Amino acid sequence: MITVAVTGALGRMGSLIIENIGDAPDMELVAAFDIRDIGMPVGTGASAGVAAGAGDVRVSDARKIDALLASTSPDVLIDFTIADAAVGNVRAAVENGVAIVLGTTGLEPYREEIAGIIAGDVPAVIAPNFSVGVNVFWKLLAEAAAYLSDWDVEIVEAHHRHKKDAPSGTAMRAADVISKALGGKELVYGREGLAPRGDEIGIHAIRGGDIIGDHLVLFAGDGERIEIKHQAHSRQAFAGGAIKAARWVMDAPSGIHGMEEVLGL
């Protein structure tokens, strides 16, 4: 049985991940962390509907995560919170010998710090997107870019109005994948005023409504274009991938791994 702790337990992703854990015959939720509803059973009160199968686990104070990881001894910590909080959660997991699945977005300013904290002490899967489809999407982009090196490339991403970071981590990974395939490209974020196109990758972010996550990459040549697109219809796409990663990380060597390793891509 894989024992799991979840941070951001009352958030959109944390709630769904806990539901998935409850449905998994080989997993058990042993701790759930957040900064509200402290002490309430997971799945009741303001967190109603969070987790069928969460047992009698109560919401623990995320500010006391170090001591609670020590007392509950989970095998893996799944973190979908916010970037600055994730750094402390990763440190607590490493200090307690807990494997990590980290899907928090906006980590770019903290990546070196997080890598230094992990430093080969525990296995960790860190990815800007845990969707199986998105990881295949990135692989397709690298393949296409290799054949379309002289075409213009534009990336458009759309998310719900509550998303804090822009562009999305998924869009930035797409840009990185394409840039590497083409030997390095400048990135331009949106355009305004006089903005003649150069030899760059354009990135554009849309925020509105309840859009789960859309990513479109446009390769435009003379007289034709190719569009490669991924759309998430529900957050289950990400939650299911996180559960796959939690199973995989149990047998992984210490250090940081990507979702492409989990999926064998």
Image (tube, rainbow, N blue to C red):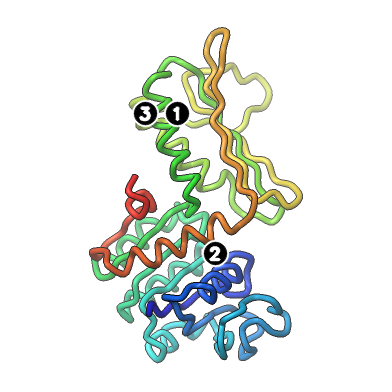
Quadrant that contains the N terminus: bottom left
Residues at marks 2 and 3 touching, judged by CB atoms closer than 8 Å = no
The residue drawn where x is 46% and y is 78% is 5
User: Is 176 drawn above or below residue 109 in the view shown?
Assistant: above
Give coordinates of residue 102: x percent, y percent.
Answer: 44, 63
User: Is 89 drawn above or below residue 235 in the view shown?
Assistant: below
Which class describes the residues within 10 Å of circle 3: few (<14), some (14-19), or many (20+)? some
Observer able to see residue 203: no
Residues at marks 3 and 1 touching, judged by CB atoms closer than 8 Å = no
Name the foreground residue: 255 vs 21. Answer: 21
Give coordinates of residue 42: x percent, y percent.
Answer: 61, 83
Give coordinates of residue 66: x percent, y percent.
Answer: 41, 84
Provide the residue designation for mark 1: 186
Q: Amino acid at mark 3?
A: Gly
The residue drawn where x is 62% and y is 42% is 214
Q: Amino acid at mark 2?
A: Ile
Provide the residue designation for mark 2: 82
The residue drawn where x is 30% and y is 66% is 123
Q: CA distance from mark 2 to mark 3?
A: 30 Å
Q: Which mark is residue 209?
A: none
Going from N to C along the chain, the mark reached first, 2 or 3, is 2
Q: Image quarter for residue 265?
A: top left
Q: CA distance from mark 2 to mark 1?
A: 28 Å
The residue drawn where x is 64% and y is 89% is 40
Name the foreground residue: 160 vs 238. Answer: 238
The outermost residue toward the right is 209
User: Is 5 drawn above or below residue 182 in the view shown?
Assistant: below
Provide the residue designation for mark 3: 184
Give coordinates of residue 118: x percent, y percent.
Answer: 30, 66
- 176 with respect to 12 (left or right): left
